[in-house]
Amino acid sequence: MGEPSSSTGLSCSNRRITRMPCTCWHAARRAGQPEAAENLIRRAISILPNSADFLGNLGLVLMDQHKIDQAIAAYQQAIRLRPNFAQAHCNLGSAYAACKQWQQAAAAFETAVQLSPICSKLTPGLAMR
């Protein structure tokens, strides 16, 4: 523990080894290593396959890598596991907007805002398509 991971070169000190993939993906993402972040999140998902949070985070790093179709699938799976996951709906809307699927983006953003009005601040310019 505290030693750099051989696959990422990043140190995750003070973390139990079983929690490492669950916590260190943030460090990999901040370090500009989205592939490493993706690998760590996928390891976490292999440990906790029904974690909507991990699937939502997977969507984020897939978006970082412009793997939009895979990100959409990750967000959809997160939403199936937790239908009231407002942030996943918002991120799904962003993924749909990135590939110009405006109707799907609007529907996802609308659901996000219904679930959490704060999401309305995260969806500026929706009408400007």
Image: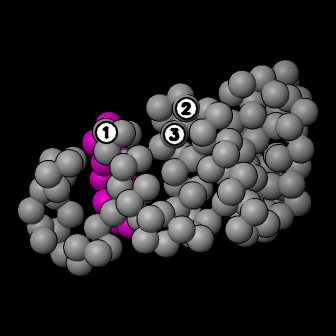
Q: Earlier in the sequence, mark 2 or mark 1?
A: 1
Mark 2 residue type: Lys
Most foreground residue, 123 or 27: 27
Mark 1 residue type: Gln
The residue stretch that appears in magenta: 22-32
Mark 3 residue type: Leu
Q: Is residue 95 visible?
A: yes
Residue 123 x, y percent position in the rendering: 76, 41
Task: Name the quadrant of the C terminus.
Answer: top right
Where is mark 3, residue-wise?
62
Where is mark 2, residue-wise?
67
At 89% from the left and 44% from the top, the residue drawn is: 107
Counting other residues with Cα less than 10 Å from the Cα at mark 1, is it few (<14), some (14-19), or many (20 or more)?
some
Q: Residue 128 bears which disc, if any?
A: none
Report the number of discs: 3
Where is mark 1, residue-wise?
33
